[in-house]
Amino acid sequence: MMEITPKILRKLLTKKYRQEFSLCILEGEKIIADHQDLVVKIFSEDSLKNLENYHGRVAVARIPEPTTPTTPFLVLDRIQDPGNMGTLLRTALAFGFKTVYTIDCVDPYSPKVIRASSGMALRVNIIDTDYAHLPTDTTYYLADLHGDKPKPIIGKNFGIVLGNEGQGVNPIFYQKPHQVMTIPMEPGCESLNVAVAGAIIMCYTHFYEWT
């Protein structure tokens, strides 16, 4: 195991080195304490006094390897905002979507995403993929402004698809077995933030699973 120095810590601010070393940065006492099984190095505040943007304890943790996919699952299609990504990963875990496929998204292991997810990005089975390698024997429920009100989903073999903040879901999903889900809203409200919409849909499907 290589020595984790402040120089390595600085490199882990970039996606290239996070992928190369399979390591990421954790910040804050609670996140570090909650992920002791993944932590490989903890830095004291004094050891980081010459590095900008770090206050308090910082740790370096292993990025877990993807495991066998489970259902139901979430597909995040070109999500670019770290706050949205972190919120969606945390919400996915809360509502039973333990596998998340990411396609051309912001790095789920960036410090901003990990903060936004309260560290839960490290507890979700994240599979970075492309459109051609998504599951084929399933139904995709697409979050879109022009569709049907959500209906109870029977069984667990399905995926929820949330699209890019500005462009929505890639049209390629309409070539797969799918249904379109639209959240009913009051007149005058055109759309919801993708993280809010995702939370509502995941909560809805989870609620019906347990009733």
Image: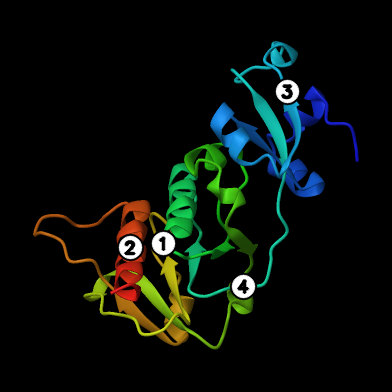
Q: State the residue in front, 71 or 188.
A: 71
Marks 4/2: CA–CA distance: 20 Å
> Mark 3–mark 4 contact, CB under 8 Å?
no
Disc on res. 203: 2
Q: Position of residue 201 (x, y in %)?
A: 32, 65
The answer to whether residue 170 is above or below residue 104 is: below
Which is more N-terminal, label 2 or label 4?
4
Which is more N-terminal, label 4 or label 3?
3
Q: Residue at x 48, y 65 (%)?
A: 97
Marks 2/1: CA–CA distance: 6 Å
On screen, residue 5 versus residue 63, left or right, reads: right
On screen, residue 206 versus residue 56, left or right, reads: left
Identify the colour scheme used. rainbow
On screen, residue 133 versus residue 41, left or right, reads: left
Classify 10 Å Cα crowding around label 3: few (below 14), some (14-19), many (20 and above).
some
The answer to whether residue 86 is above or below residue 76 is: above
- The secondary element bearing badge 1 is classed as loop
Residue that label 3 marks: 43
Amino acid on which the number 4 mark rests in the picture: Pro
> Mark 4–mark 1 contact, CB under 8 Å?
no
Which is more N-terminal, label 1 or label 3?
3
Which is more N-terminal, label 1 or label 4?
4
Amino acid on which the number 2 mark rests in the picture: Cys
Residue that label 1 marks: 95
- The secondary element bearing badge 2 is classed as helix
> Mark 2–mark 1 contact, CB under 8 Å?
yes
Amino acid on which the number 3 mark rests in the picture: Phe
Q: Residue at x 46, y 85 (%)?
A: 175
Q: Position of residue 96 (x, y in %)?
A: 46, 65
Residue that label 4 marks: 69
Classify 10 Å Cα crowding around label 2: few (below 14), some (14-19), many (20 and above).
some
Q: Residue at x 71, y 11 (%)?
A: 46
